[in-house]
Amino acid sequence: MEQGIKDIIKIEGERDLVRDKNSKAILSRNYEGLKAYKIQKKQMSLILEYENDINTLKSEITEIRATLEVIVNKIK
């Protein structure tokens, strides 16, 4: 059920915050802030994914170097 305007109470001195009459929860009506938060969260997720990819590549390069050293030592 969608919450109607009658189910919220304006909070004095707060432009973007309201209180739900039923649950007494404080809710934000700052949709631009929410949008910015979601964008930032997605960017952080991508950064963490890239960091994981870089660490995986570093590990694989270390394994390749070790394997090449073994091969070179067997050829000598």
Image: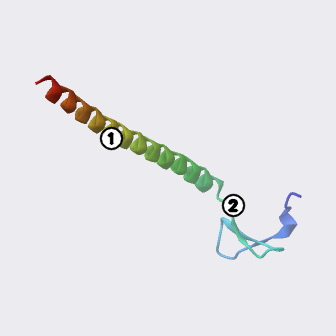
Residue sitting at x 45%, y 47%: 48
Residue sitting at x 23%, y 33%: 65
Name the residue tied to disc 1: 59
Q: Give percent across and percent down for residue 56.
A: 38, 40
Residue sitting at x 66%, y 67%: 15
Give the secondary structure at mark 2.
Answer: loop
* Relative vertical location of residue 61 with respect to residue 75 in this rendering, above or below: below
Where is the N terminus found, in terms of image quarters?
Answer: bottom right
Name the residue tied to disc 2: 29
Please report whichever mark, 2 or 1, sits nearer to the chain's N-terminal start. Answer: 2
- Left or right of 33, for residue 9: right
- Left or right of 72, for residue 24: right
Specify the amino acid type for callout 1: Ser
Give the secondary structure at mark 1.
Answer: helix
Which quadrant of the view contains residue 73? top left
Where is the C terminus found, in terms of image quarters?
Answer: top left
Q: Using the numbered discs, state the Cα–Cα distance from disc 2 to disc 1 in whole angstroms.
A: 46 Å
